[in-house]
Amino acid sequence: MGVFKPVSPRVDFKAQEANVLAFWKAKGIFEKSVEQRRGAEPWVFYEGPPTANGLPHIGHVLTRVYKDIFPRYHTMKGRYVFRKAGWDTHGLPVEIEVEKELGLSGKRQIEEYGVAEFNRLCRESVFRYVEKWRELTDRIGFWIDMDHPYITMDNAYIETVWWILKTFWDRDLLYRDYKVVPYCPRCGTPLADHEVSLGYAQTEDPSVFVKFPVTDEPGTYFLVWTTTPWTLPGNVALAVGGDVDYVKVRQADDTYVLAKARLEVLDGDYEVVEEFKGRALVGRTYTPLFRFLPVEQEYAYVVAADFVSTEDGTGIVHIAPAFGAEDMEVAREHGLPVLMTVSGEGTFVPEVKPWAGLFVKDADPLITEELRRRGLLYKAETYVHTYPFCWRCKTPLLYYARTSWYIRTRRHKENLLRANREINWVPEHIRDGRFGNWLENNVDWALSRERYWGTPLPVWECDSCGEHVCVGSLRELEERAGEDLSELDLHRPYVDAITLPCQACGGTMRRHPEVIDVWFDSGAMPYAQWHYPFENRETFEEQYPADFVCEAVDQTRGWFYSLHAISTLLHNRPAFKNCVVLGLVLDEGGRKMSKSQGNVVDPWEVLDEHGADAVRWYLLTSAPPWAERRFSARLVGEVVRQFMLTLWNTYAFFVTYANIEGWRPGSPGVPAVEGRPALDRWLLSELNLLVEQVDGALAAFDATSGGRAIAAFVERLSNWYVRRARRRFWEGDEAAFATLYEALVTLTKLLAPYTPFLAEAMWQNLVRSVSEGAPESVHLADFPAADRALVDEELNAAMRLVQRVVRLGLAARNRAGIKVRQPLAELAVACPREEQEPLRALAELVLDELNVKALRFVAPEEVVAYRVKLNPARLGPRLGPKLKALRAALQGADHTALGRALRAGEPIVLEVDGESVTVAPDEASVEVEPIPGYAAAVEGPYTVAVATEITDELRREGMARELARHLNQLRKEAELELTDRVEVWLAGVPDDVLAEHADYVRREALAVRLETGEGPDDVTARKALRVNGLNITVAIRKVEAK
RNA sequence: GGGCCAUUAGCUCAGUUGGUUAGAGCACUCCCCUGAUAAGGGAGAGGUCCCUGGUUCAAGUCCAGGAUGGCCCA
């Protein structure tokens, strides 16, 4: 019975992960990992809440993996890392889904359908995929408390949001204003700037040049350009640039006024009849194109405005105050009327008779046609430009005058910027780049949405006197309303039904019907997740601000901003100290994944194929976090083979031989580190260096380089340490077992944050099974601390040298065409003098690996000949005909001396026709030629050669190794256990080989008996071979254990 | 139109404050090693370091302009 549970090199990671998940769940490991640090210094993580009304995709896996690794690491470092899940449940995306399902379109239909029922469906839909989210979260090993999440639609959450808004209200940070806003006519709501930015797209719009008849000058027109003909019925003025040059031109029977710099827009010949500054036009009147709405003020005249440019259009801008922010400014300045020709649904109002009820964009061609019919159209073209569309429903946005509620973030711009400077952004450039720029250009936060499913704006207004109150808590609402509202759903329509008696005039106060921007919900989570300040004040104090938040780069203006803005306005400090910003996940072809393109990678496919650790490892190590990354299952598979299986096999190797030898950690026979062979001390030196590196990297939020360092170590562990120490394990060498064990156990701890399943599986078997006192899970263990005393830089350098010499030696053997199994007499090494001693100390490793008998330090010339070759391309132009003579001189020269000089970077001098010619190192090259008896490889100052002579003695030894190898191959093919003993028969092997090496062959093949001949009929396996030109038959028979 | 990021081998990525002949892994060819390995090693093939110009003794690296892609803003 072995000490450890046997480990097969053929591992099913998926099945193993399922077992680990079950173990974690059964033992409550996650809860314990948090609880065990209670009382320790908190390290605070905030979860950016996803919406569960859609399925999670691979991009969510990326963020969740990053959100997992650092909390795990800090937990292992001894911090108390509370992890509360959250759900974002409000907002337009949710409403849009429900609208689609109900087949509704627009706010009117929703209201006819009934807001109560509509919101009930919204409430249901937000958790539609919550189980899928939980499954995925669970499956990828993202440890977060999904059983006690904060939910933005809960009354308690809303109450905290109200408290924040009330606080802002009391500080005059919340106000209402008329403003032209980007407005989605389909959704019936204005959009916030960050929403608008989600929907810019190339589009083709009309480009029409319209003739505005100048009053008192028949046949003369102001030429005006617009891409939105539908705004023309709302026109009230024209704007020109005061200092801009304008001209009056004659074309056929008509005269046009336009900017001189824009004459290019005219078709055909024209005659300039007059030139003047724009200010000369101010006050001139024109005949309005349309007169649908009654107007009392004076209007339809020319004004000056500084935003008029001559980059496009005609230099004369049509002003429709209801449909442009700048237009509204002009109207305010000049007391112009605001013509509301369009309804809240984006259709013309009844007064606009010809097009009443028509969606404005659809009316564009009709209006253009109407103008053409009336002779007021100069020309109509189309124009391709970027224009904002609704990010959810793709309807073109209209700029439209609405009343809206705002938060005065601009007033706190300096605070926002100052707080930003305290944040550690990863990558750093976000701070002054993307996020800093955004804050620099801060505008007041458009808070309100004229929608249904959201946190209601807690502002009530009196019918009679216009008095406002902002309600900051449920209790305040109850007190003002004078009734028990503990059962009230704070959503619409129920909250709308609550009216308050006006304390000023006794009138009735009704709630403003808006709900608020959902980004405000999520940005309020530091407070609202604890129902602060109504409950959990201490918890809040402890859990604010966050040490760590992490989302993809698209959250810069989303959640990162809303968190930052609310925290800064409320407490004048940042909500988070460190922010890791992730790049987007692209498909295998480098394209953005989108549902509409159908190239979204389903995380389950790759999780089912390769397992969660593989996906995690790939996402963490394949590229720095902020880089966009291409994702494909194929690349994840590569990671499995290269990293995970290499580690696993090393682990399996250890367990196999530890069990065979009955070795267990803590064995009294294990020598102290100083007493172990250099190879062991080297491994532990590298190991402690690794610990230091990974610790430092994770502390700096750099999972990528930490992971890459681990991968590099595992590669060295498997392909150098185990390879070189293998024989010692067969022999039960305690130092080897102890060294490999320490490396593997440390690796499980280093890997715990990266690949928690694999680390757990190894921990359970390597540690937990042999040590009752050990933590129940690797995730309850402390992160390893580096032992600096074990780091030996000189040894590390010496080992690098060894590996280099081995590499060159293998290249030399390869060049000689002598396989490694054939022993050779001598390895000749030329290297810098100071490296000879370190190499000599480790010579055994080199000789063993290269299968040579002795190491000798030589001068390079002893094993290679130099041949100097002139470079005619460089020397020809300089020397001309003398080159030929130089060649001749070189023929008889001492190439060894010249080559040595050139290789040292020195010029050489040759006598040519009694004249000294200097040849620079770049004018000649040195070729290395083998000399008889050696094969060599050269790299920089290193020359490594093997003596190629194979004596009969060496040949016999080589034959013995061939036999051992083939016998072992046969053992393997016969699927024998590593401990099985065999009887061996050999036929066709020369007697002298057996005479000298029978013992060796027996030992290598674990043979209890070695005979010549074909062997009996009942052998376990037999094979005919051709070895070194001889026909040989080998046979083995398994000896049954007694 | 502006800001930020990226662009290095067929693919995925390294490449320090500028410094020899630009690297690794995967895939390909030949050879080798294997008493853990789905691994490993050697050799080969594979590069306009996105382009143009500049600074410098020296540029993948620094500067300017441009191209392409992505994100963000107007």
Image (tube, coloured by chain):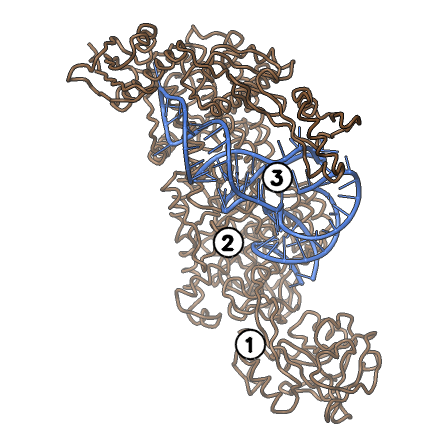
Residue A1019 lies in quadrant: top left
Mark 2 or 3, which is nearer the eye? Answer: 2
* Tag of residue A591: 2
In this view, the residue in front, A200 or A401, is A200
Task: Determine which residue is flagged by label 1.
Answer: A361
Q: Distance from label 1 to label 3 (Cα)?
A: 46 Å
Residue found 25% across the figure and 14% down from its top? A986
Q: Position of residue A806 (x, y in %)?
A: 51, 20
Q: Distance from label 2 to label 3 (Cα)?
A: 29 Å
Q: Earlier in the sequence, mark 2 or mark 1?
A: 1
Task: Determine which residue is flagged by label 3.
Answer: A578
Height in image: A573 above or below A1035? below
Q: Position of residue A642 (x, y in %)?
A: 44, 33
Identify the secondary structure beneath mark 1. helix
Determine whether label 2 and label 3 are within 8 Å by CB.
Answer: no
**Letter of the chain in brown:** A
Query: From where the camera sits, is residue A37 visible?
Result: yes
**What subunit carries mark 1?**
A
Q: Distance from label 2 to label 1 (Cα)?
A: 32 Å
Identify the secondary structure beneath mark 3. strand
In the rendered structure, which amino acid carries the disc numbered 1?
Answer: Lys
Q: Is residue A436 left or right of residue A461?
A: right
Residue found 52% across the figure and 30% down from its top? A75
Q: Position of residue A696 (x, y in %)?
A: 59, 28
From the image, state the color of chain B. Answer: blue
Residue found 64% across the figure and 17% down from its top? A832
In the rendered structure, which amino acid carries the disc numbered 2?
Answer: Arg
